[in-house]
Amino acid sequence: MKLSNNKILITGGATGIGFGLAERFIRENNQVIICGRRESALQEAAKKLPSLHVKTCDLTVAAYREELYNWISVHHPDLNVLINNAGVQQHMSISDPDFLARTLEEIAINNEAPVHLSSLFINLPSLKTIINVTSGLAFVPIARIPVYCASKAFLHSYTLSLRHLLKPKNIEVIELIPPALNTDLGGKGLHNYAPPVSEFIDAAFIGLRQGESEISSGFSDTMKNAGPEELKKVFNRMNPVS
Ligand SMILES: NC(=O)c1ccc[n+]([C@@H]2O[C@H](COP(=O)([O-])OP(=O)(O)OC[C@H]3O[C@@H](n4cnc5c(N)ncnc54)[C@H](OP(=O)(O)O)[C@@H]3O)[C@@H](O)[C@H]2O)c1
């Protein structure tokens, strides 16, 4: 994709990786729209980046995804890049009483939303690029976040098909595969051990500039390229039997 003069929607762009992408894309001379559930987080982001356009939206609800698409088609019909970044990470056990409810919510945001939004946004005549944000955990799961890891494996697989399906329409499909980064994903403080978002944003922009369609770094790069024996070893290391 070209890296300037785009109009880009970043879901979940008020915080973490989405905000890091928004910041960098604005610096590279793009117009950026972000959406998310919390008005306060959107306003805080807009205070830091005054050129941002913001839209409140809960992407777990199909009708709100349609409303978002309709709003974009009226107010930003020249949007040419969709970044499916919004996601949640539920730490849970299968015997928790709210296991199913949390699972369904996690699948709605991590999977239903990117699948639905892609099917809507390809109808914008200007759309040229879809970027899906997966994870190194798409390749090897951590059992205490079971549905999260499965949702990222789903999105990785779906992204491969989407890239193939959208070739005839000349819509490019890119996958960003971050390693663990210091954001509030899963709850405040849980990712404090990880490197800053800026490290991955730098790697992502090098990959985008080089025209890569799958962009990973560190752990996620190692897992993407690992064979079955290495994946088994890493699984055992990350999931010790207590
Ligand atoms: N941090 C990591 O270690 C890591 C590693 C690999 C991949 N990722 C992926 O990177 C993406 C961004 O995560 P992050 O680490 O930057 O965490 P984050 O700061 O918590 O960002 C997640 C964003 O998604 C939005 N969101 C959540 N549920 C939503 C919903 N129902 N509707 C609309 N927006 C919603 C949140 O805003 P609201 O709460 O205001 O809705 C928030 O801005 C996720 O897909 C995550 O899986 C993260």
Image (tube, rainbow, N blue to C red):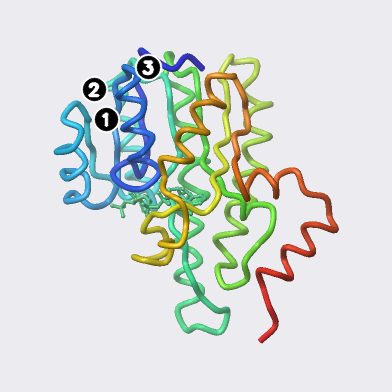
Residue at which label 1 appears: 71
- For label 3, being within 8 Å of ligand 1 is answered no
Query: Cβ–Cβ below 8 Å for labels 1 and 2?
Result: yes
Query: Mark 3 and 1 residues: CB-CB less than 8 Å, in contact?
Result: no
* Label 3 vs 1, first from the N-terminus: 3
Label 2 near ligand 1 (CB < 8 Å) = no
Residue at screen point 45% across, 78% down? 98
Q: Amino acid at mark 3?
A: Asn
The picture places residue 190, in percent across and down from the top left corner, at 42, 66
Image x and y of residue 144, in percent:
57, 73
Disc marking residue 6: 3
Distance in Å between CA atoms under marks 1 and 2: 6 Å
Residue projecting furthest to the right: 229
* Quarter assignment of residue 175: top right
Q: CA distance from mark 3 to mark 1?
A: 18 Å
Q: Nearer the viewer, residue 57 or 204?
A: 204
Query: x%, y% of residue 159?
Result: 62, 37
Q: Which mark is residue 75?
A: 2
Nearer to us of marks 3 and 1 is 3
Q: Nearer the viewer, residue 66 or 213?
A: 213
Q: Residues within 10 Å of mark 2 (few under 14, many from 20)?
A: few
Q: Return the disc, 3 or 2, that comes first in the chain's sequence.
A: 3
Query: Is 1 drawn above or below residue 108 in the view shown?
Result: above
Local packing at callout 3 (Cα closer than 10 Å; few below 14, some 14-19, many 20+) is: many
